[in-house]
Structure formats: structure tokens, C-alpha cells
Image: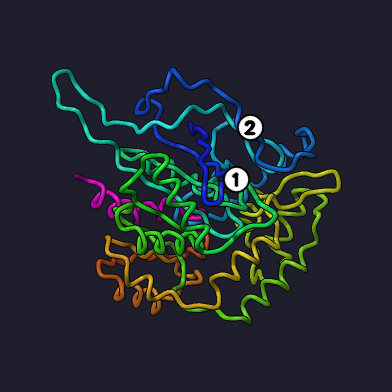
């Protein structure tokens, strides 16, 4: 069961984080009144109907079928456990002020150190709930917090930005400091992985270890950015139904080479119902702006400055090629490598068990005193 924690990021941006620490490891603060977390999506979202519930169930079934040998799919949940809203987005539960959980103590024992912190950073267009498979496997012995980064999920989406690399990194640092997670283990996917290793390079005092999931260090270039601009323009949004969302992103999208139900389910989780249909909870223009700040440059220099133990994980069919991944490991002073067969870019989402088998030994090694 997750609790929502509000954090103030760079430039005063309001960020939503989800603390997945087991309840018996975190004592509530009696001085902190309960409050209801704000809605994740659009203010003109309508009440849930039977069709939305059916589509959410269909999405879960699609992921189960598409997961393959790595394990089953996940129940849509952007953070807190609770009744689902349309699009599989649950009703946020009340939250209390953040507390740094301590390891269990016995009578007469010495005070224990805080539980090691793990911060999960999703990729572009994602949200904290896409880490749900990892959360269920990482809460033992760790304090696991998943962040909705600015412009995503339940966090603020300031019209004027900024959506720079500096802002994303400063936000992550603010979460670590305000929630008392440091020195933290950062686990990032795609753009979130870039944020993670840039924070590790700039603030080594805050970071204990790092997991990079399917993110390239090479520049992608202007052609890549133009392709993304064209792709966003092709979206038939607003979508008339969640079924249409699943169908387009899982099959009809020109970028889909073979039917991919899990991809459809992934995007269905970041849709909200408006009066005219289903739209993403993020602003596509803000996503393009965020991407513009990193696709034109290579990031080998910042990677080489990461001094903490780092695991580079790729899906065998993902966007990070084996040769580049192994070069990243070579550049890292303390790098390690893992790959997940049959997985693509969304490796932690579609193959949670295999992802956990690849990552858990590394985490246990760096988090064990």
C-alpha cells in the first residue's frame, strides 16, 4: 500500500511521490493530519463507468498474455493502491508527512540506521505506476519511493516549464533531500535513467548506487526529434475509448512492427477521460520540449563521472544496443551489465520477474551494510 508524499521541486514545482515502504516499517506521525491527495488527471474527468472498468480489466489481461517468460503483467496503478478510475488510474489514498523508516529493533538493541532508500524514475511519458512490478519486489529491506516527474502523472505541469535537464535533476535531488532518502540508490528507465546518472555525477554525496534501464549515452540527433514530432501529430487524439487507445498504441501505430498489447496497456495507463474523449495526462508539447534538451547531445562525459556502483540493464530487443551498453559499462568506473531476453524498451513493465532477477542481486549487494 503506497502513500502519496508531496515534494517541492526546483522552481517551486509541486511533485507527487509514492512511498511503497511496508506499513509496519513506517510509523505515522501523529502530528500530521491526514489529507486527500489531489486527482491525477484532468479536472473535467467524468465519473467512472462500467466500460472503463471493462477496459482496465482488458488491459491487465493483455499484459498477462504479452509478458512472456519474464512474468505476468501488472495491474494499472500509478502509485497508491485503491479503486481504479477510468484508464486504470486509482483513487489516491490519504497521505501523511514523510518519515524516514527505521529498521525493526528489539528490546535492548542499539538504534538501527535508516532503511536504505531507493528512488524510481520513470521515462518520458511514463508515470510512477509503471514501476509497480518492481515495487512489489523491492520493498523487502528497502524504502522504495517512485516519483512522478514534472509534467508527468500527478505532478505539476507548469505551462512555462522549465523542462530542462537541470530542472529534472534538481527535482530528483529535492526528493532525495526532502524525504531523507540519501544516500539513495537511483533506478531510472530511459529518460529517468539519464536524470539518475546526471544526479549521481553532480551530487555523489546523495547517491549510493545506480541502475540504468535501457537508456543510450549516444546522441540521437535532430532526425530523431523530427520523427517524434511527426509521431505525436499522428495520434488520433482524443481517443473515443480506452479500447481505441489499446488498439492504436498496440497495433495501429505506424511505429509498431508487430502487435504489442503490452505497449497498448502502457499508454492506456497514462490516459484520462475528458468530455471529448481520452487524452494523455501529459502535454505532448512539453514532452517534446523535455526531449529536445537531451537528444542532440551525447552523455558519455557525465556517465564517466559516476563514481558509485552502477548496473546497466537492457532488453534484448530494446533501444540500447549490446555494444553501446557494454561500452557504457567500460566507461563507468564501477559498472556492471545485465540483459533480459525477449524484453524490449519497457523491460521492467513487461518482464517484471526477469527484471527483478537481473536487478535484485545488484541491489542486495550495494544496500547490504
Query: Residue 158 in the image: x percent, y percent?
Result: 66, 51
| Residue at 37 percent of width and 46 percent of height | 118
Q: Main secondary structure of the magenta part?
A: helix
Labelled pair 1, 2 in contact (Cβ < 8 Å): no
Q: Is 129 inside the magenta-drawn segment?
A: no
Judging by the rendered image, the residue that carries numbered circle 1 is 155
Q: Nearer the viewer, mark 1 or mark 2?
A: 1
Judging by the rendered image, the residue that carries numbered circle 2 is 91
Residue farthest to the right?
276
Query: Element at badge 1?
Result: loop
The relative height of residue 277 versus residue 318 in the rendered view (above or below) is above
Query: For the C terminus, which image quadrant?
Result: top left
Report the span colored magenta: 347-369
| Residue at 29 percent of width and 31 percent of height | 102
Q: Quadrant of residue 82?
A: top right
Query: Element at badge 2?
Result: loop
Residue 227 versus residue 30: which sits nearer the camera?
Answer: 30
Amino acid at each position: 500500500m503506497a502513500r502519496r508524499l508531496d515534494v517541492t521541486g526546483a522552481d517551486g514545482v509541486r511533485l507527487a511521490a509514492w512511498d511503497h515502504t511496508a506499513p509496519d516499517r513506517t510509523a505515522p506521525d501523529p502530528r500530521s493530519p491526514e489529507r486527500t491527495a489531489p486527482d491525477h488527471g484532468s479536472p473535467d474527468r467524468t465519473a467512472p463507468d462500467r466500460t472503463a472498468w471493462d477496459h482496465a480489466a482488458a488491459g491487465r489481461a493483455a499484459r498477462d498474455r504479452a509478458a512472456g517468460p519474464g512474468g505476468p503483467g501488472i495491474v494499472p496503478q500509478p502509485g497508491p493502491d485503491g479503486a481504479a478510475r477510468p484508464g486504470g488510474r486509482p483513487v489516491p489514498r490519504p497521505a501523511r508527512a514523510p518519515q524516514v523508516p527505521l529498521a525493526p529493533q528489539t528490546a535492548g538493541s542499539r538504534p538501527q540506521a535508516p532503511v536504505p532508500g531507493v528512488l524510481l524514475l520513470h521515462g518520458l511519458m511514463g508515470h510512477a505506476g509503471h514501476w509497480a512490478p518492481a515495487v512489489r519486489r523491492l520493498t523487502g529491506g528497502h524504502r522504495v519511493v517512485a516519483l512522478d516527474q514534472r509534467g508527468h502523472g500527478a505532478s505539476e505541469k507548469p505551462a512555462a516549464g522549465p523542462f530542462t535537464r537541470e530542472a529534472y535533476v534538481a527535482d530528483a535531488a529535492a526528493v532525495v533531500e526532502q524525504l531523507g532518502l540519501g544516500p539513495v540508490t537511483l533506478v531510472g528507465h530511459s529518460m529517468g535513467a539519464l536524470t539518475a546518472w546526471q544526479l549521481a555525477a553532480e551530487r555523489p554525496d546523495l547517491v549510493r548506487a545506480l541502475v540504468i534501464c535501457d537508456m543510450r549515452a549516444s546522441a540521437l540527433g535532430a532526425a530523431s526529434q523530427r520523427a517524434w514530432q511527426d509521431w505525436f501529430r499522428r495520434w488520433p487524439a482524443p481517443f473515443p475509448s480506452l479500447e481505441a487507445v489499446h488498439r492504436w498504441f498496440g497495433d495501429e501505430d505506424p511505429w509498431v512492427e508487430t502487435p504489442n498489447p503490452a505497449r497498448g496497456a502502457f499508454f492506456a495507463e497514462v490516459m484520462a477521460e475528458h468530455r471529448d474523449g481520452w487524452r494523455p495526462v501529459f502535454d505532448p508539447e512539453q514532452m517534446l520540449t523535455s526531449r529536445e534538451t537531451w537528444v542532440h547531445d551525447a552523455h558519455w562525459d557525465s556517465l564517466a563521472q559516476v563514481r558509485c556502483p552502477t548496473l546497466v540493464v537492457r532488453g534484448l530487443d530494446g533501444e540500447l544496443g549490446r555494444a553501446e551498453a557494454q561500452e557504457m559499462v567500460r566507461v563507468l568506473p564501477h559498472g556492471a551489465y545485465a540483459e533480459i531476453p525477449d524484453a524490449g524498451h519497457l523491460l521492467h513493465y513487461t518482464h517484471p520477474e526477469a527484471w527483478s532477477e537481473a536487478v535484485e542481486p545488484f541491489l542486495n549487494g550495494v544496500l547490504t551494510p
